[in-house]
Image (spheres, rainbow, N blue to C red):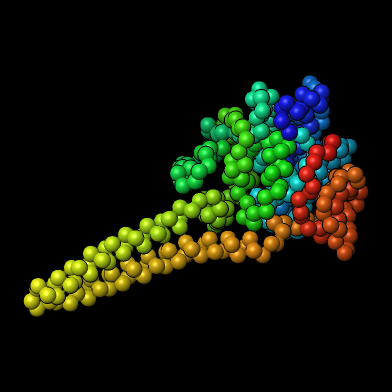
C-alpha cells in the first residue's frame, strides 16, 4: 500500500512480521520478547495500529514449535505455520507472506543476528521516503562471520550485478520492509526455486535502505555454512540460473573460442602436410586436444542441463510447500487453502487443517 493511500485511511499502518525458522528453540524466547517490546512501544506511541508475528516452522525437530505455542499463552499476536517437511527458507518466507494481513510486512531471520530494535528505523525510512515500497537493510558490519564467507558473498553478488539487469545490493540480506502491493506481487510469482531477494529487486518500485551492524548469533550454529551444498545450490539455481543468462553466454563463448583455435590448428596441420617433409605425428597434441574439447563439451552440456532442470521443475507445477498445521490464526482468517480429506487441528488452534496445500491467498487487504 502506498504512503499516499495510508494518509487517506486516516490511521496508522498495521504490521506483519514474518519469521522463518528451523531448530531455533534456544533463541526463540528472547526473539519473541524483544519483538513484543519493540512493537508494543510502536503501538503505544501510535506509530502502528496493530501487529502480528507470523512464524513459519520449517519442520523443526528441537521443540521450537512447542516454544512458539507456549509463547501464545495470554497473547493473540502470534501465528504459527508448520510445514509438512523441510522446504527451505524462501518457500517458508513466501508461505508466511501469503498468510499476512498487515499493510506493511517485514521479513527477517529468527536467529537474532538481525536486531528487532531496527524495526522503528525501517518504519521511519518508509514514512520519510514518500512513496517507498521497499526498505532494504544493508550490513556495514557482520560479526561472527569468517572473512572467507564475507569475501565469497561479495564476489557472488558482484557477479549477479554484472550478469543481470537487476541492481543487487551487495550487503543486503533477508531483513526488509515491504508494502502490501509488493507482497501481493511476490505471492503471485509461482517460481519453483524462489530467490526472494532477487524477486524483490526484480519487482522494482521505489526502494531505500537502512544501514546497520549485524550481530553474531547469541547461541546455536548457523544453518548455512559456506561448505554446505545448500549454499551453492541456492546461489546457482535460485539466483544465477533464475536471473541471468550469463552461463549460457559463457558456453557460447567457450564454443566460439574453441572453434577458432580448432580452425587455426587445422590450417597448421594442412600446411605441415604439404610443406614439411617427414611429418611426425604428435600423440601428445592429439590427446590434449581431445581432452580439451571433451571437457568443454561436458561443461557446456552441464550448463544447458541446469537450465533444462529449471524448466523441468517449473513444468511439474508442484506447490512450493505443504502446510502440516497452523496455530493462532483467528477463525475468520480467510485464505484460499483447500481443506484436505482428513482434517485435524492442534488443540485450541484456529486456522487451517493439517495436510492443506499452500496456495496464494486472493489479493486484497484484511484488517489485523
Report x, y in % for residue 318: 70, 62
Q: Does 137 sit above or below residue 319?
A: above
Q: In the orientation shown, which residue stands out farthest toward the top? A: 45
| 156 over 208 or under it: above or below | below
* 259 relative position to 42: left or right: left
Name the residue at 81% across, 43% down: 79
Query: In front: 141, or 316?
Result: 316
* Quarter of the rendering occupied by the N terminus: top right
The residue sitting at 79% across, 25% down in the picture is 8
Q: Can the viewer see residue 26 in this picture?
A: no
**208 over 269 or under it: above or below:** above
Q: Give the number of marks.
A: 0
Along the horizontal axis of the image, is 173 left or right of 103?
left
Query: x%, y% of residue 23?
Result: 69, 50
Residue 128: in sight, yes or no?
A: yes
Tell me what residue is drawn at x 89 percent, y 60 percent. Answer: 343
Residue 27 horizontal/vertical position (percent):
70, 41
Seen from this angle, which residue lies furthest left? Answer: 277
The C terminus, quarter of image? top right
Q: Could you tell me which residue is drawn at 69 percent across and 32 percent down? A: 116
- As rendered, which of 140 and 102 lies closer to the eye? 102
Q: Nearer the viewer, residue 347 or 172?
A: 172
Amino acid at each position: 500500500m502506498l504512503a499516499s493511500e495510508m494518509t487517506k485511511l486516516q490511521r496508522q499502518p498495521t504490521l506483519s512480521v514474518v519469521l522463518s525458522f528451523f531448530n531455533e528453540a534456544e533463541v526463540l524466547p528472547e526473539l519473541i520478547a524483544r519483538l513484543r517490546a519493540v512493537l508494543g512501544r510502536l503501538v503505544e506511541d501510535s506509530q502502528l495500529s496493530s501487529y502480528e508475528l507470523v512464524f513459519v516452522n520449517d519442520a523443526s525437530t528441537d521443540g521450537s514449535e512447542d516454544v512458539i505455542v507456549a509463547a501464545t499463552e495470554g497473547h493473540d499476536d502470534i501465528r504459527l505455520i508448520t510445514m509438512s517437511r523441510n522446504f527451505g527458507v524462501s518457500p517458508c518466507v513466501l508461505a508466511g507472506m501469503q498468510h499476512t494481513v498487515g499493510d506493511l510486512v517485514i521479513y527477517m531471520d529468527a536467529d537474532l543476528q538481525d536486531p528487532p530494535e531496527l524495526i522503528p528505523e525501517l518504519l521511519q525510512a518508509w514514512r520519510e521516503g514518500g512513496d517507498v515500497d521497499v526498505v532494504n537493510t544493508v550490513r556495514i558490519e557482520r560479526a561472527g562471520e569468517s572473512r572467507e564467507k564475507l569475501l565469497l558473498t561479495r564476489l557472488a553478488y558482484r557477479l549477479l550485478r554484472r550478469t543481470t539487469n537487476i541492481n543487487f545490493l551487495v550487503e543486503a540480506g533477508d531483513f526488509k520492509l515491504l508494502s502490501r502491493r509488493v507482497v501481493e506481487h511476490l505471492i503471485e510469482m509461482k517460481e519453483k526455486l524462489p530467490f526472494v531477494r532477487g524477486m524483490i529487486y526484480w519487482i522494482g518500485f521505489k526502494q531505500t535502505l537502512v544501514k546497520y551492524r549485524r550481530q553474531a548469533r547469541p547461541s546455536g550454529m548457523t544453518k548455512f555454512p559456506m561448505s554446505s551444498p545448500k549454499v551453492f545450490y541456492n546461489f546457482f539455481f535460485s539466483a544465477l540460473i533464475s536471473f541471468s543468462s550469463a552461463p549460457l553466454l559463457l558456453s557460447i563463448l567457450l564454443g566460439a573460442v574453441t572453434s577458432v583455435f580448432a580452425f587455426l590448428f587445422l590450417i597448421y596441420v594442412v600446411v605441415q602436410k604439404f610443406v614439411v617433409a617427414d611429418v611426425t605425428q604428435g600423440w601428445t597434441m592429439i590427446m590434449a586436444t581431445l581432452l580439451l574439447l571433451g571437457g568443454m563439451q561436458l561443461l557446456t552440456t552441464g550448463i544447458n542441463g541446469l537450465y533444462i532442470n529449471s524448466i523441468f521443475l517449473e513444468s511439474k507445477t508442484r506447490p512450493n510447500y505443504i502446510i502440516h498445521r497452523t496455530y493462532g490464526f483467528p477463525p475468520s482468517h480467510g485464505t484460499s487453502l483447500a481443506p484436505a480429506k482428513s482434517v485435524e487441528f492442534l488443540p485450541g488452534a484456529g486456522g487451517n487443517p493439517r495436510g492443506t496445500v499452500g496456495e496464494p491467498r486472493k489479493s486484497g487487504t484484511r484488517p489485523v
